[in-house]
Image (cartoon, rainbow, N blue to C red):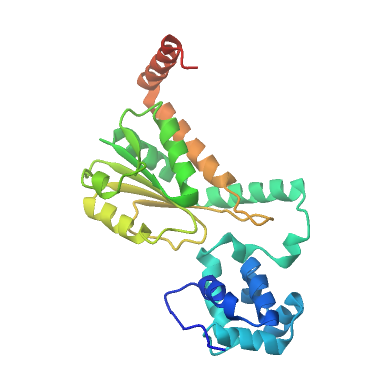
Amino acid sequence: MAEFPVTKDRSFLYRVRQALPDLRPAEKRLGEFVCDFPGELASYSAQELAALAHVSKATVTRFIQHLGYETYEEARRHARAEKQTGSRLFLATATDASTAQSMQAHVAQSMANLEATFLSISDGQITAVTDAIMAARKVWVIGFRSSHPFASYLQWQLTQVIEDIVAVPAAGQTLGEHFVSLREDDVVVFFALRRRTAQADAILTQVRKSKAKLLYVTDEGAPFDTRATWHMQCQTFAPGPLFNHTALMALCHLLITRCLEKAGTEGRKRLRNIEALNESLEEL
């Protein structure tokens, strides 16, 4: 059987999925198990993984070789590195799949995420961000994949306070059509939760080049980035197979509320006018 060719810039899971069609039955069963719970390989020895997947240790060895790794430890290092920034699948375990998580476990994790997140963000940072947003010529909000709904939510709520704020890119548009207009007195809010898109690094570099202020919002797995004016990391741990975004929503709510407070009389006037227009247009 031909081994899967080594491609250094491919993810661990990509290698497994590409190899699956050509694997023997026992190896394929192991491959499917690893696709569902890749974090198990990052956490366990070859013997332990074999027991979890109900295959022999020799099957594990052949499987690893077919993926293009020389040793099990090399594959485990790759999976472990990907666990920090990759798919939520890396944080799921075979035990999770057979156990219903209690409501108390989810609530407790949400509270822990909130506490950890706001211990890492100072009140001074929140004040500096809201001051910059309120003073900006224009506010740009960016988010792809799982980050997109949070970008849209922040833009939608802040529209009630700020006249010139836009979520980009819209359908059918590219970032270039917007970034050409970036100015030094603008603010960019970039949501980049895992898994971050390949263009994230280029976006950070371009915003830095424009000299616009940048609020970079990520999960706890993203390394601190000095290109951002402010980098706020939200803890997203969860007892189940999905990320918990409670802390991220709390951060959005805090920023929106602070902006509304800072807007003062003019902000309340804008809100009144919005409500009056909604009534006159009979939209709600």
Say if 123 sits above or below 80 in the image: above
* Residue at (26, 55) in percent of width and height: 206
Q: Is residue 96 left or right of residue 256?
A: right
Figure label count: 0
The answer to whether residue 274 shows anywhere in this view is: yes
63 vs 114, nearest the viewer: 63
The residue lying toward the viewer, choosing from 164 and 230, is 164
Q: Quadrant of residue 130?
A: top left
Residue at 65%, 71% (x, y): give it. Answer: 32
**Which quadrant does the N terminus fall into?**
bottom right
Q: Residue 240: name its quadrant.
A: bottom right
Instruction: Report the front residue among 136 and 126.
Output: 136
Q: Please determine whether, in this image, residue 72 is positioned above or below residue 159.
A: below
x and y, in percent, of residue 116 in the image: 58, 52
Give the residue at the far top of this rendering: 280
On the image, the x and y values in percent for residue 69 come to 53, 86
Residue drawn at (40%, 18%) of the image: 274
Query: In the image shown, does 202 or 175 lie closer to the viewer?
Result: 175
Residue 57 x/y as whole percent: 71, 87
| Residue 121 showing in the rendered view | no
- Left or right of 74: which side holds 185? left
